[in-house]
Image (tube, rainbow, N blue to C red):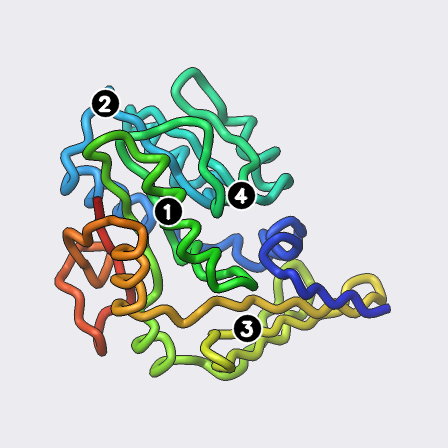
Amino acid sequence: MSKDITKWYSEWFNTPYYHSLYKNRDDSEAKKFMDNLTQHLSIQKNETILDLACGKGRHSRYLNSLGYSVTGIDLSDNSINFAKQFQNDRLHFAVHDMTKVYEQQFNFVFNLFTSFGYFEKEEDNLNTIKAIKQNLKPNGIGVIDFMNVDYVIENLVPSETKNVNDIIYNINRFVENGFIIKKINFIDNGDAYSFSERVKAIKLNEFKAYFKAAGMTLLEIFGDYNLNKFNTHNSPRLIMIFQ
């Protein structure tokens, strides 16, 4: 039996396979980034942070452990249900569509680890930026941590195989119609599964256009989690701070 998931970001993120495949993500790197970012932005303990598209809340939980008041939102019911076990009076999670305005305003809105550009409709990329603007308090700061498209394409690994919990994942990567696509195929208990990750290859100039259309100003750009200067060809990340 084949299970072909097309609306990938609402379905794939909700499966146990997604979390199993990516279970070895580098938490130390994520923590280091949060340390560097919060220090650079001089975030005070009485200020609030929205973690937009938070997944299972690894960034939210660490930010909260540093003493910050954090709300994490994500479209995945399974991810939010998992994250809710860690809630406290300064850490909350909710299911929410990032293209729409959330019910609160925050001092900071973080969108981390390439949690952008998933949408089937191009206008939803701009709608997300507009929603971020509405979710920020006056003088609030937004941060988008995206991939550096030029670097990713130049270093793209076309195919690989991963064995995770005795499931063989066959992974193929390619660029098509302005999207970086990852096809993931595997068999579990006799069933064949086919998933696709599809992220728009958004470059800096396109983000600048989104910010301008949303009435926001790009303040700073960094190229990695150590907050080094962005370089189109050598930087693995495109980290944008805007207001």
Image coords of residue 182 (percent x, y)? 55, 73
Identify which amino acid the numbered label 4 is placed on. Answer: Asp
Q: Are marks 1 and 4 in contact (CB under 8 Å)?
A: no
Give the mark nearest the N terminus, 4 or 3.
4
Seen at 67% across and 52% down, the residue is: 15
Q: Which mark is residue 213?
A: none
Q: Which mark is residue 182?
A: 3
Q: Which residue is mark 4?
A: 97
Image coords of residue 181 (percent x, y)? 53, 74
Q: Secondary structure at mark 2?
A: loop
- Vertical position of residue 87 compared to residue 203: above or below: above
Q: Are marks 2 and 1 in contact (CB under 8 Å)?
A: no
Q: Which residue is mark 2?
A: 45
Which of 236 and 75 lies nearest the eye of the viewer? 75
Seen at 66% across and 67% down, the residue is: 195
Name the side, left or right, on which 171 lies relative to 236.
right
Which of 232 and 224 lies nearest the eye of the viewer? 232
Q: Quadrant of the N terminus?
A: bottom right
What is the CA distance from the residue labelled 3 to the residue labelled 2?
A: 39 Å
Seen at 31% across and 70% down, the residue is: 203
Q: Which mark is residue 130?
A: 1
Give the mark nearest the N terminus, 4 or 2.
2
Q: Quadrant of the C terminus?
A: top left
Q: Secondary structure at mark 1?
A: helix
Q: Are marks 4 and 2 in contact (CB under 8 Å)?
A: no
Identify which amino acid the numbered label 1 is placed on. Answer: Lys
Q: Residues within 10 Å of mark 4 (few under 14, many from 20)?
A: some
